[in-house]
Image (cartoon, rainbow, N blue to C red):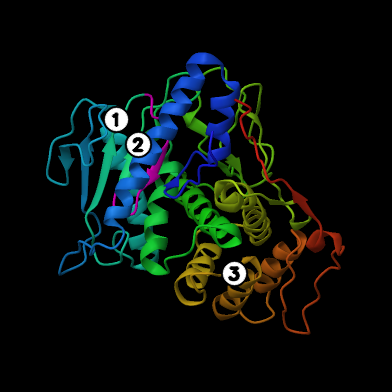
Amino acid sequence: MSNIQQDICAVIPWHMNNRLASRGGPEISRRALATFEQMEGISAARALIADTGIESVAVPVRKNRRIYDCKHTRQLPGHLVLDEHGHRPADVEVNEAFDFSGLTLDFYEELFGWSSVDGRGKLLPSNVHFGVDFGNAGWDGKQMIYGDGDGVIFVRFTKSRDVVGHEITHGVIQYIVKLGYSGQTGALNEHLADAFGSMIRQRSFNETAARASWLIGHEIFGPGVAARGIRSMAAPGTAYDDPILGKDPQPAYMRDYVETNDDNGGVHINSGIPNKAFYIAATTIGGYSWQLLGRIWWKALKERIASDVDFNGFARATVDAAAELGGSGGHVQLSIAQAWALVGINVPVPVSVAIPNIPPAFASQKRHQSNWFRPTF
């Protein structure tokens, strides 16, 4: 198989589908390869819409949702089945896509005054029942796309509200800063989608940082799959360990940063490092993650980073934003700086603030891997 670069924002990373294609047995392999093929089709279609104008309304609205049923075809959009003024059909995927996109839009509007993905009330289309055995969900630059999974490894992707929040957040990022999607920049893109997706879930269940699971996609795995989620923000590298899926490859520290040519430079792998920093900061500060830490991450995203920001640049942006929202040299800023330092990213802070000494190895060592889970056939 060629070294496929996943250039749409999709929740199931390249390395996981690649593992299924190479290790899953004839039927699972066939379905994984079909998912790859359908992803390539979405990517080709995305190239045609990448520079189109945004659809927005004159007066921003909180929700402007439309749900389409692709009826297991690859036509995008599919057949319109639900909007803000329609009646709910007897289709759980349609209703979940509608409800969980609503949770996400409410989150951005109520906390940050941001209407839809573009801040201007843009129509948000979501497509369910895409393709056949499509084992993924994603944002293609214009709309949401959800597969039903194969019923063995993956079940319906609309089932997870943090997956829905994660993917719509990619749309928000696209309109705010057009953040790149390779290397450290791409890993930050994935981190931000994970962090906000997790906060959207936590807010919907009224969970404190201490009580949250910090798992992404807990609900999307079939029975018998040894997986707690796609990723764990609390403990990167522990989300799954399954005979077919393999072991979660995410690092939690810069000493284990993975150098790879696959997955756009390991964007879904190395996002574990900023994910861990966010988790440490959230549980150190305490309370509800979205109330203060979420506002700091939002301020950093919206006001303080460029489209090619790296880990250090984003860490500095959050520490600076913390000074504005929580006080320079205060507990909040210190907690965030410490969180970054504990994963091996050291950020300058006021001289009066003491940061614990972190072994140089955290920042200097890297794990090299140029052929991550490459199939052998």
Q: Which residue is mark 2?
A: 146
Q: Is residue 365 left or right of residue 114?
A: right
Q: In percent of the image, x 32 and y 59: which residue is there?
A: 117
Decide if residue 135 is in sight here.
no
Residue on which disc 3 sits: 314
Q: Main secondary structure of the magenta part?
A: loop
Q: Quadrant of residue 309?
A: bottom right
In the image, 13 versus 338, the foreground residue is 13
Q: Amino acid at mark 3?
A: Phe
Task: Identify the element where label 2 is drawn.
Answer: strand
User: Residue 233, percent across and down?
Assistant: 62, 47
- The quarter in which the N terminus is drawn is top right
Answer with the quarter of the image where residue 213 lies: top right
Q: Is residue 134 magenta?
A: yes
Position above or below: 89 against 236? above
Q: Does 204 sit left or right of 87 as displayed?
A: right
Q: Which residue is mark 1?
A: 129
Dot 3: few (<14), some (14–19), or many (≥20) neighbours within 10 Å?
many
Residue 170 image offset from top left, x and y in percent = 42, 55
Q: Earlier in the sequence, mark 3 or mark 2?
A: 2
Are the residues at dot 2 and dot 1 in contact (C-beta closer than 8 Å)?
yes
Mark 1 or mark 3: whose residue is earlier in sequence:
1
Q: Give the residues drawn in magenta, as a range.
A: 133-143
Q: Is residue 112 magenta?
A: no
Which residue is found at the position 68% from the left and 56% from the top?
280
Q: Quadrant of the C terminus?
A: top right
Distance (Cα) linking label 1 and label 3 = 37 Å
Q: Quadrant of residue 327?
A: bottom right
Q: Determine the residue positioned at 30% across, 31% down.
A: 93
What amino acid is labelled 1 in the image?
His
